[in-house]
Amino acid sequence: MKETLGMVLAGGRGTRLGPLVQDRAKPAVPFAGKYRIIDFVLNNFINSGVYQIKVLTQFKADSLLRHLTATYHMPISLGMYIDPVPAQMRVGEAWYRGTADAIFQNAHMIRDAHPARVAVFGGDHVYKMDMRQMVDYHKSKNADLTIAAIPVQKELSNQFGIIEVDEDWKIQRFVEKPPEGQTIPGRPDMCLASMGNYVFNTDVLLEEIDADARENTEHDFGKNILNKMLSHRSVYAYDFASNLVPGATEKEVGYWRDVGTVDAYYDANMEMRSISPVLNLYSMAWPFRTNPSLYPPVKFVFDEPQGRRGEAVESLVSEGCIISGARIRRSVLSPGCFVHSHADVEDSILFDRVDVGRRARIRRAIIDKDVRVPQDYEIGCNPEEDRKRFFVSERGIVVIPKGAKL
């Protein structure tokens, strides 16, 4: 793994997340209370022994850059680093025009590092992955390019980029969101969906992105680079469902979530706070690092006979929160939240420093940072009123933007 350079694509707009990306890039969106979405790919790299990592940023990158510099301190004297790389327009006057162009515009960093291979991964998915197993597979196949893929029900093929393989899992074709995708050999009910994670031999990657840069394409790995390579390169799919992370339970195998919409993001957070979550954040065999907090411990106060009691059940409550005679159920609270007496929060996600006033009621909502919910205020209780005031997802999740004045 010392011969592998990690490059994380973290410049996407993530517009389907609505108000959650009003002031930040998608990989910087908070997740599971104290984390950011990008923490997952970075911890997967680190836990897999990849210690040379470039994070390519672009849109609304300030929050992401501050998180990276505050969180990840690698000893450069030992050849380890996580370097944020803002878009620099080194090769022209354009921003990144696609995933392949993002790598092309920063190809000088690859040449400077002299790696044997480059792992190009997205920065906006939630999963655990031991990348050593993918690299071993890549080497065993003598592949030029290996793509991580996850089996999905064939009825869902129209939601993913679908990879068609032969019996040896050599890729034959890539089709973007087909109405009915070709199934996996021997598995007539399943298709292979691309995860957007690639392992390239370095010389191959540089040759292919150089050639693509001279053509009039979308400069996208899936749509352009992959299909063009199939005619003259050795390209294989890696079965993510076979990846076994140290300390993982059986039900964690193959867990991967694309949190690209408000509803998908909400569901993934709710999975984290469930009694027996599919993705276990508590395993020290595969630790998840994030920005160390300076907040004090969580505090639950009041236990009066009349029912004024600070309590939280089936919830994630981060450090620095004060639950003051309020009730929290099936929710996720980020650091520094204050929920006042007789308030009721259910099935909701509160970002950092949300202050919920007395007797307020919150249902199925996502409230971004630094919002003060007035006393007796209701969110998620009256769908018609909510749609007049706020962003509401297809499934009725109410989203309050960062710093909103209610």
Image (cartoon, helix red, strand yellow):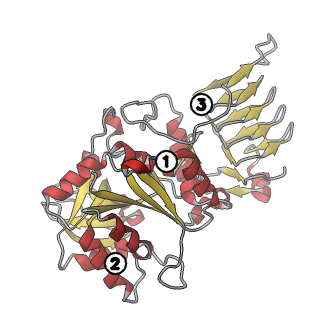
- Asked if residue 159 can be seen in this view, the reply is yes
Q: Are there few (<14), some (14-19), or many (20+) residues within 10 Å of tag 2?
A: many
Find residue 39 and name its label. 1
Q: Nearer the viewer, residue 22 or 331?
A: 22
Q: Nearer the viewer, residue 35 or 389?
A: 35
Is 266 situated left or right of 222 in this image?
right
Q: Amino acid at mark 2?
A: Ile
Cβ atoms at labels 3 and 1 below 8 Å apart:
no
Up-down relation of residue 141 to residue 377 (above or below): below
Answer with mark 1 or mark 2, whichever residue precedes in sequence: 1
What residue is drawn where x is 41% and y is 30%?
A: 283
Give the secondary structure at mark 1: helix
Is 302 situated left or right of 118 in this image?
right
Give the secondary structure at mark 2: helix
Q: Amino acid at mark 1?
A: Asp
What residue is drawn where x is 24% and y is 77%?
A: 229
Answer with mark 2 or mark 3, whichever residue precedes in sequence: 2
What residue is drawn where x is 62% and y is 33%?
A: 318
Label 3 and label 1: CA atoms lie apart by 21 Å
Label 1 and label 2: CA atoms lie apart by 27 Å
**Quarter of the rendering containing residue 148:** bottom left
- Asked if residue 310 can be seen in this view, the reply is no
Q: How many marks?
A: 3
**Which numbered disc, 2 or 3, marks the residue closer to the eye?**
2
Q: Nearer the viewer, residue 328 or 292?
A: 292
Q: Which residue in the protein does label 3 denote?
A: 315
**Quarter of the rendering containing residue 286:** top left
Is 334 situated left or right of 403 in this image?
left
Q: Position of residue 226 (x, y in %)?
A: 29, 73
Q: Are there few (<14), some (14-19), or many (20+) residues within 10 Å of tag 3?
A: many
Q: Which residue in the protein does label 2 denote?
A: 209
